[in-house]
Image (cartoon, helix red, strand yellow):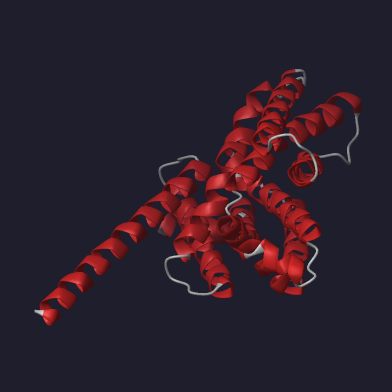
Amino acid sequence: MSEFLEAVFTHAFMRNALLAGVLASVACGIVGTYVVVRRISYIAGGIAHSVLGGIGAAVYLERVHGIVWLDPTVGALIAALLSAVVIGVVSLRARERIDTAIGAVWAIGMASGILFLSKTPGYGEDLMSYLFGNILMVRTSDLWLIALLDAVILASALLFYNQFLAVCFDEEYARVRGVDVRFYHLLLLLLTALTVVLLVSIVGVVMVIALLTIPAAVAGHFAGRVSQMMVVAVLVSILVTTGGLALSYGPNLPAGATIILLSGVVYLGTVVAERIVRGRRRRLSGEADA
């Protein structure tokens, strides 16, 4: 731990990594709560894996055709938003099965991304960093973009908090009350897409869904209200991103994988501890009744 703290004060890239984890945790906790409550993690997974197509296209166009403004983060953002719109429209309007649409978006995004990266000179070896993330490579410009996307997500969550609650828990009641369920469902998918883009730079395409859902799932064991669940999820996400970064530094382990493993340990520990507490309460209650 002392080595990690020394590195944070000494190296700018470590400070960027730490700040990226904290900033992304804000969106992760807020949107992840909605994803868990509404049970749309499978949709979030489809959006997450389609992002590789945008990353690959951006890298290819930048390196081969000199389009310098189109960096991987911008490409990921475009791909995520487009995928969210496609999945949202199909789920609300078309007769096509939603799982078929998600599978198609998932597969097309992954395949096109791999093809683009394979045709980019010198970028074949970078595929692993996009799939599994590299938080240590986050730049200062990336932090500004993450902060901007954070602001958009936070503002949307505050402005439409009640509408999102109605859509997540009771669509029929929301319709009766005059809430535009289709609009807010699509908006929630777009916010999920933004959050996916934030997390891709930290844990990569493959593991982004875990960091999006596990902190919120842990928070669900401690919070009785959605607003409380969001706050706890943000704190849990900060804990696992910072802790994973610290644990990976000394042994030189992949930071993204360490973050996900730590979040998994926290979740399993929470479930086991809750069951132990419940078991003890039942035994005490039985003894009191006797």
Residue 278 x, y percent position in the rendering: 26, 68
Residue sitting at x 79%, y 56%: 182
Residue sitting at x 45%, y 40%: 253
The C terminus: image quadrant: bottom left
Compared across the picture, whether 232 is left or right of 192 comes to left
Residue sitting at x 56%, y 65%: 234
231 versus 11 height, above or below: below
Q: Residue furthest left?
A: 290
Q: For this rendering, which residue is in front, 214 or 74?
A: 214
Residue 3 x, y percent position in the rendering: 44, 55
Q: How many marks?
A: 0
Q: For this rendering, which residue is in front, 127 or 224?
A: 224
Res. 277 image quadrant: bottom left
Q: Residue furthest bottom?
A: 288
Res. 59 image quadrant: top right
27 versus 135 height, above or below: below
